[in-house]
Image (cartoon, rainbow, N blue to C red):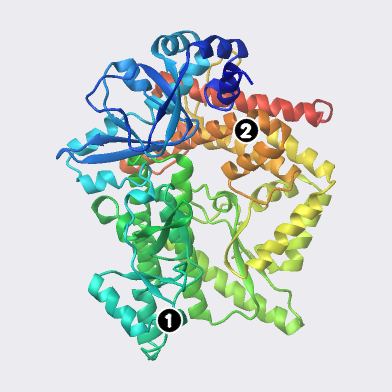
Amino acid sequence: MPVHEEVIEFLKEVPPFQFLEEEDLYSIVPGMNMEFYPKGAVILQEGGPPSDALRIIKKGAVQVSIKGEKGEELIIDVRGEGETFGLWSLLEGEQKTTVRAIEDTICYLLPKERVKHLLDTNAIFTEYFLRSHISKYLDKALKERIQKGLSQREVERAIFTTPVINIASTEPVTVKVDTPIQEAAKKMAEKRISSLIVVDEEDVPVGIITDRDLREKVVALGRNLNEPVRNIMSYPLKKIDGRRYCYEAIMEMIRNNIHHLVVVKDGKLYGMVTNHDLMLLQGSSPVSVAQEIRNQDSIDGLAEVSKKITGLIGLLIKEEAKARTITRIISEVNDSLIRRVLEIAEKKFGPPPLPYCFIVYGSEGRKEQTFKTDQDNGIIYRDPGTPSEATEAERYFSEFSEFVKESLLRCGFASCQGNYMASNEKWRRPLSVWKRYFSEWINTPTPEAILQSVILFDFRALYGDTDLARELKEHLLNTLKGKDIFLLHMAKLTVNVKPPLGFFRTFVVEKSGEHKNELNLKFRLIAPIINIVRLYSLETAIPETPTIERIERLKQIHPVMKEVGEELAYAFEFVMTLRLHHQYEQVLSGREPDNYINPDTLTNLEKKTLKDACQIIRKTQEIIEQHYMLGRVM
């Protein structure tokens, strides 16, 4: 393959070049060069000459950093294959960051003149870099934080820009599997550490012991201190690749109720990262909030800790986290709170008469919660074997679910207006009844059945016997096969709500009432995207519930989503970000958060991006209308 063709094939997979017309690609490639930078090489130096080209990473990775007040290096980003750097330096004529190769790296160089020409003449190219570079990678916000007095430690450990490897301990302390417990405890005390990695005879990590293991498995049980550590270690090890970002480590810790993660590099043991390493501004972090939740033994205590969740969202917003990151972290913290409520409920009412699974659906099921969170939950329990078992199960779960509802109310979770809660007897049923519900809705798709499907089909297991939820999910996906009439009705609902953009590309807003001149982000933009993605997920039997995860799967297997998936994902991310920032501003001013914004308050770029979101929604709805021939049946 000629060199030019090889470059073009590479750029066709890299945004924003993949959006360019082929003739534009062929016009820029002849002027491009390729450079190699060995690991450790400084490519661009802060305060040095500005970049003379936009560099596109073909292979390898680079680290972007700035100098702190004391001259220390503050790492703000890591970029890999397909990503770019040097644009802002090229445009401003000033090099504000240091870019260093952290692996042997090969870059394509697009000269300054050609970059400026593309920015001047190609709207797609310009818009992409306005979105991804100017908004995301400007170091202005980071420097402002330093000027406001935040410490180097706080900035350096920003959870959304720092790879785990940058904060992990680089000399993990290990012990052999046959080491006596007492010897291991002495080693932890001498080293002043809270964990040890347990290795086998060939030094392969096989487990971990922590101070918690010593308390709960040794001291509390009066265990013989001469026993080997293999008897008390936790396994399998929870690991994270050092190139992953710190927020991913936080979610892993919350999800698994752990305080330590083994860090690996190139598949080999590198070090350890702990909850302490992930503490954020003023000692507040999602992990510490989740831990506070677990430490509570009463609903009063949980209600008090739950007040910190709003502040946590504000912290994540200030850290410039993506909307999908914020909603996922908040969902993990909320999950921890709900699980603790359920544990307290079980302690109060005693063991359940039958195995059960507490499920959540709606935005909870999709892990897309923001400031205003309703209760959307249900209980699936094993089918009773006798009438007396059935009576006892109904009595127990009735009292149990009412306690859970009231407890969550006290913790800030509003009741569901449609009463889709386990406290409603309809939504606490044996597995066979839940299966019957789903089958009836699919086989007889009345308007009410479609509405219930939209809410409850986005369910996931939260607590208890998760096999019950798995079995129900399998039943759902199997029942959907060949049910074209149900999918037709779901498609009609999907195209029913149009995005708020008029014929002349003006926003359609409320004409009167409390929200005059405003539009509803949730109803007019977020819900249509969720409905589109759900429809295609049901068509293809995808079990995931989060919208972005569904899009990523669908982009690989669904012909329409291969075409529009990337744009829909960006539109969803953008509108969710607008919604989060809008609600945060309302909370700060003491108002109840809602979903209404006035488009006139947006910047020109925000207006343009919102209009683009409307257009991709409309385009996809039109594809659905054509596929299902809705013009003939609506």
Where does the image place residue 605, in percent across and percent down from the top left?
43, 20
Circle 2: element type:
helix
Mark 1 surroundings: few (<14), some (14-19) or many (≥20) residues within 10 A? some
Q: Could you say which disc has been placed on residue 77 in the image? A: none
Q: Quadrant of the C terminus?
A: top right
* Quarter holding residue 528: top right
Q: Is residue 28 left or right of residue 604?
A: right
Circle 1: element type:
loop
Comparing 98 with 215, the one in front is 98
Is there CB contact under 8 Å for labels 2 and 1? Answer: no
The residue at the far left in this view is 70
Looking at marks 2 and 1 on the same chain, the residue that comes earlier in the sequence is marked by 1
> How far is the residue under mark 2 from the one under mark 1?
52 Å
Where does the image place residue 610, in percent across and percent down from the top left?
50, 25
Q: Residue at x 45, y 45 (%)?
A: 325
Asked if residue 234 is positioned above or below residue 317 in the image, the reply reads below
Residue 508 in sight from this viewpoint: no
Q: Could you say which disc has been placed on residue 565 in the image? A: 2
Q: Which residue is mark 1?
A: 178
Q: Amino acid at mark 2?
A: Gly
Q: Is residue 179 left or right of residue 124?
A: left
* Quarter holding residue 302: bottom left
Q: Is residue 160 left or right of residue 202?
A: left
Q: Is residue 613 left or right of residue 56?
A: right
Asked if residue 507 is positioned above or below residue 469 in the image, the reply reads above
